[in-house]
Image (cartoon, helix red, strand yellow):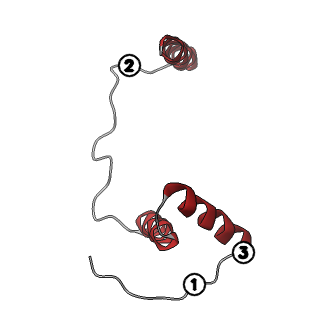
Amino acid sequence: MSLTRTTVYVDSEDLAVIKEGARRRGVPEAQIIREGVHLAAMASREWDESFFDEPLDLGSRVTRDQIREATASGIARGAAGQQAA
């Protein structure tokens, strides 16, 4: 990967958060900024093909109650797993 130098003006509070995060993680501030620029580039990119080529078929229509039940069940399993750890 070749890098290109650029100048960006940022909010001073954001920069303070980046500086603190870099210190905590033990990485250069520039690494965190590059990660942020990469995420922005990926979010702005136009993809040649659709991420979802085919619609997801669950066999039948999923009801609101089924979604709530599955979500509650997953949360309960996650909570039980955290208590065991």
Crowdedness of circle 1 by 10 Å Cα count: few (<14), some, many (20+)? few
Tell whether label 3 touches label 2 (CB within 8 Å).
no
Between marks 1 and 3 in the image, the one whose residue lies nearer the viewer: 3
Q: CA distance from mark 2 to mark 3?
A: 51 Å
User: In terms of secondary structure, where does tag 3 sit?
Assistant: helix
In this rendering, position of residue 12 left or right of residue 75: right
Q: Amino acid at mark 1?
A: Val
Label 2: how many residues lie within 10 Å, few (<14), some (14-19) or many (20+)? few
- Image-quadrant location for residue 45: bottom left
Residue 68 got which mark?
none
**Residue at 34%, 33% in the rendered image:** 56
Checking the image for residue 12, the label placed there is 3
Callout 3, which amino acid?
Answer: Ser
- Residue occupying image coordinates x 65% and y 71%: 15
- Residue beneath disc 2: 60
Q: Which residue is mark 1?
A: 8
Where does the image place residue 30, in percent across and percent down from the top left? 48, 74
Give the foreground label among 2 and 1. 1
| Quadrant into which the N terminus falls | bottom left
